[in-house]
Image (cartoon, grey):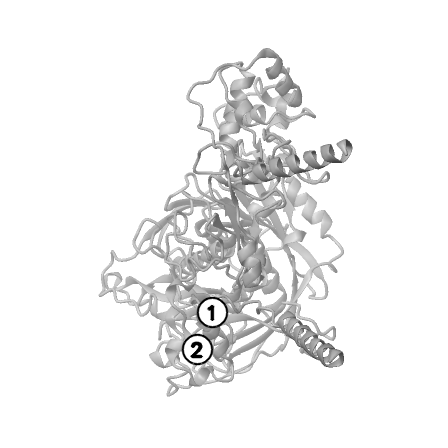
Amino acid sequence: MCCRVRSQFLSLACLFVAAAILEDHSVTAQFEWQSRDEFDALKYQMDSVTAENCAIKNVNELHMPEDAVSHLPDIKDININPVFPNRTALLHLHNMALNRAFFWSYILQARFIRPATNDTYDPGMMYYFLSTVADVSSNPRLNSSAVYFSPNMSYTSSYRSFFNKTLPLFAPRTFRADDYNDPIHLERYSTLNMFDVRDLGAISKNSKSENYTTDYYRINKWYQAWLPDQVDGRQDTKTTYQVKIRYANNTNETFTFHGPPGADEVPGPLKWTQPYFDCGRSNKWIVGAVVPIADIFPRHTGFRHIEYPTYTAAAVMEMDFERIDVNQCPKGQGNDGPNRFSNTARCKETTECEPIHGYGFRRGGYQCRCKPGHRLPNTVRRPYLGEIVERATSEQHHANFHCEKIGWIQKQPVQWGKMTPLLRLQYLERNSNYMNSTQGPNSTHTKAKNIDHIISFIRSVNEHNCNNRNLFSPDDLVLHGDIGFGAEQQFENEARMALRLANFLSGFLQVVDSTEVFSGNRLADRPLTEDQLMAETLALVLGNTKIWAAGTFWERRKFPNRTLFAPYAYKEQLNTRKFKLEDLARLNSTEDIYLKKPWYQHLKSRWSTNYDDLEKYYLKMRIRSEEYADHTQKYEHFPISYKAADLRHGYWTRPYFDCNGFVKKWVTTYAAPFFGWDSLRTKLEFKGVVTVTMDLQTLDVNQCPGKYHTPNAFKETNKCDLKTSYCVPILGRGFDTGGYKCECKQGYEYPFEDAITYFDGQLVESEFLNLVANQATRYDMYKCRLASASTNGSTWVMIFVFAVVTNMVTFWFTH
């Protein structure tokens, strides 16, 4: 009987153990609890289209909805509101498309500047090809660049006896190729420096599926955005831009040309394409920015009244869709749509969603912050990362990622007074640079820098007093480099536009040989002309509102038929259609010549002999076999390569006031070198420098702490109470104090009834200045409060436990 009971007991024990093992192995799957949403639907569409099946897919399956990309940069909003960090790549795509459209519009109409001859002033085909190559090579986020012409609207100088004739179709396009398995690179890794270049207009006349102007092409939304242009012969349908030109011989000319629509027009100069699968080409999901190119058409009729401005082509810049961040936060201020991914974040009801940049097309690009009136648990240091929230199991998500309600919230004070002398002295001792500090020009040279005095001095300098030697010395108008901290990151897009022109010049000077002879009617590209370089320089200013001036400075006797050549373009006000262009070669005195500028001397000295550190770019070019060819052929030099500078090879100047220059502002300049063959085409040599100049006042100041080696003059100048809070930068506030917020540290809470959960840096700075001036201030109230219990439940438990323990101890000692 005992044995039978024991065996039954053992059987039951085994069943319980087996059940426990099974339960332990049936853990909830990582994404099992999450319901299907728009992100999953779009991800399924992306994965279902491949290079093998895209040709048989329905055209709708090759395009995503328009709201798949949100917060698209709008030129009407760029100079008003700050651009999100996760949209700087799209903004650069936007600016590059504008840059190329302005250049091509200018150069195609520049024939009106030159005498009328039976020849075309248009660039050759290699100019088009290498221009698109430079767009992609200098910008790692750009996937492709192209210029698509309407039928019979493209002129060229690359063929004999082709004056006033047009190509049936012409579409030079470059996209970044994967060279992982390319025999050129034995290392077997992708360098991102291989480019596939081809003319998409060299097709059979009867092939509709290869004709990018027809609906059979299926992925040509970029063509349909602006082309074909229906103007009905009117002369007033295209926006005009005015350029005042001053040549090296001091002669002047005003040139007005037609270009893309203005920023104040509807819909503006640029249109975005839907994300689409680039079937049969790069075979990726990409997004494009499209800007029209204007020309006076038809040409050489002899009757100007029938030649009218029209859009003859479109400049298209594209980037990978997977590199664009998605915003999963609910709709609200700053995220008012259209956004297909809105409200797909997994934040709980006590938290609110905040986007984080750098995640691309994947979940988790956000953080869950506590809502007003709530705080993080004492065991949590920072807001919950969306990436961790998305990976959590159902049990983990239910038990964690919440904020606790603050039990006692204070009202903001209505009246306040002066701080007591002792407390005021304590605060001033913590910020000793406000006690007996230096003002005026000397404030920038002291070791303990007072940020308010430095900014006050910078604002006091203007074009009317900068030459007053009683107020400022020449050294006072050149600031220390650490005052311009952050320019390399915040002005990276502008620097890359200068790098793009430098890369193009390097490529053209190394790839194109004007003396080369080809078979058939094809001619080699002519040497670079003054008009082309002036147009390229002007396009830098036209295509980016942050660039106030740009220049292309050639080394002595390196530009064809010129001793010195330095086209310099600039603008005198922010939103304008009037620009100025000068050849600075006319300033040839010892103190004014550009060859003596520090940035030019630095780059020339650095790149005088050794060019091994330059980036090497490989081109696989396929050009049309003849004028009216129906197929492409490999370029005679296949593949061909050239060397050019990278962003790190350029030079950033110290911030300076351009008193004797053309931009009367505090500015900073980036300079990029370009290179070409020597006269024997045997070795590289330094050819010149491309510069862009930006307004220092648009640079955001960073007052938060940084690493000890960070060259930031304003590091740790924030006024946060560092015992209870920490500093977080806020973008978009320019060259001023208060560009930060004071977030509560772990174990502390925001004490006031407010719509935010932090102390705004501008308010903190303002109240601190009241403290310095010994006026009424609330500065001592801008600190976080030690976090207490959110409810009294845990307090009663502690009292009960304390009472029980006390009774037990008393009973122990009495008995």
**Which residue is at the front of the view, 579 or 759?**
759
Q: In which quadrant of the rendered image does the C terminus lie?
A: top right
Horizontal relation, residue 744 to residue 247: left or right? right
Residue 224 in view of the camera: yes
C-beta proximity under 8 Å, tags 2 and 1: no
**Which residue is at the front of the view, 616 or 223?**
223
**Which residue is at the front of the view, 674 or 285?**
285
The residue located at (75%, 60%) in the rendering is 612
Residue 437 in view of the camera: no
- Image label count: 2
Residue 120 on image: x %, y %: 42, 67
Q: Is residue 422 above or below residue 815?
A: above
Q: Is residue 443 above or below residue 150?
A: above
- The alpha-carbon separation of the residues under discs 2 and 1 comes to 38 Å
Residue 374 on image: x %, y %: 50, 41
Q: Quadrant of residue 508?
A: bottom right
Instruction: Give SS at disc 1.
Output: helix
Q: Which residue is mark 1?
A: 40
The amino acid marked with disc number 1 is: Asp
Q: Is residue 721 above or below residue 261?
A: above
Residue 117 on image: x %, y %: 39, 64
